[in-house]
Amino acid sequence: MTDVNLHDAEVMGIEHDEDNKELVLKTVLPSGEKCQVIFQSVEWWELCSFGVQNVLFSIAPFDKHSLTKAIIDDQDIPDQYVQLVNEGHYVLFVIKASIGLEGWVIAKKMHIGPVAEKV
């Protein structure tokens, strides 16, 4: 599942796996296909406005080369997390919403995959 367009995907749930340092957004694409956005090696996140309806506009990554003061100020990123990104160890992922859930995640990687089957 590569190059998935998350625009208008509905976020149905959020999971945090503390042991594996993962944050997972469970989504349904406009096509009806279920997928999950997995942030790996998560250091911190701030998410807000998770409500009855949560529709993504985009998830934008910012690394040490693309992170700007305007983004830092707009998202109100604490200095210790800006430092992690500027050192090149982490990426800032900004979650923009059409409605509902938005925020940011500091993680090493993000990937999109199918929803794992429950065992």
Image: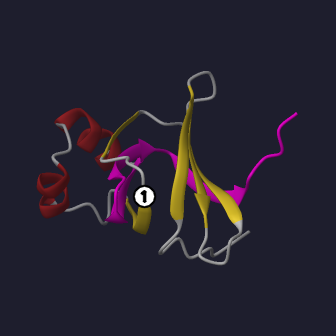
Residue 66 sits in quarter: bottom left
In the image, what residue type sits under mark 1?
Answer: Asn
Q: Is residue 117 left or right of residue 72?
A: right
Horizontal relation, residue 111 to residue 56: left or right: right
What residue appears at the point 42 percent right and 33 percent down from the top-left corner?
Answer: 43
Q: Nearer the viewer, residue 42 or 86?
A: 42
Outermost residue, right side: 119
Our reading of the magenta stretch's main secondary structure is strand
In the picture, which quadrant includes the N terminus? bottom right
> In the rendered view, does 67 fall on the left or right side of 91?
left
Residue sticking out furthest to the top: 19
Stretch of the chain drawn in magenta: 90-119
Where's residue 12, x and y in %? Answer: 55, 51
- Name the residue beneath numbered marker 1: 54
Pick the front one: 108 or 101:
101
Residue at 56% over, 23% down? 18
- Residue 5 appears at what percent x and percent y? 56, 76
The answer, for residue 85, to whether it is visible in the render is yes
- The residue sitting at 62% across, 73% down in the picture is 4
Q: Is residue 34 above or below residue 77?
A: below
- Identity of the residue furthest to the front in this view: 52
Snapshot quadrant of residue 82: top left
**x and y percent of residue 96 in the render?**
33, 63
- SS assignment at label 1: loop
The reply to whether the magenta stretch includes residue 85 is: no
Q: Quadrant of the C terminus?
A: top right
Q: Is residue 105 magenta?
A: yes
Residue 89 appears in the figure: no
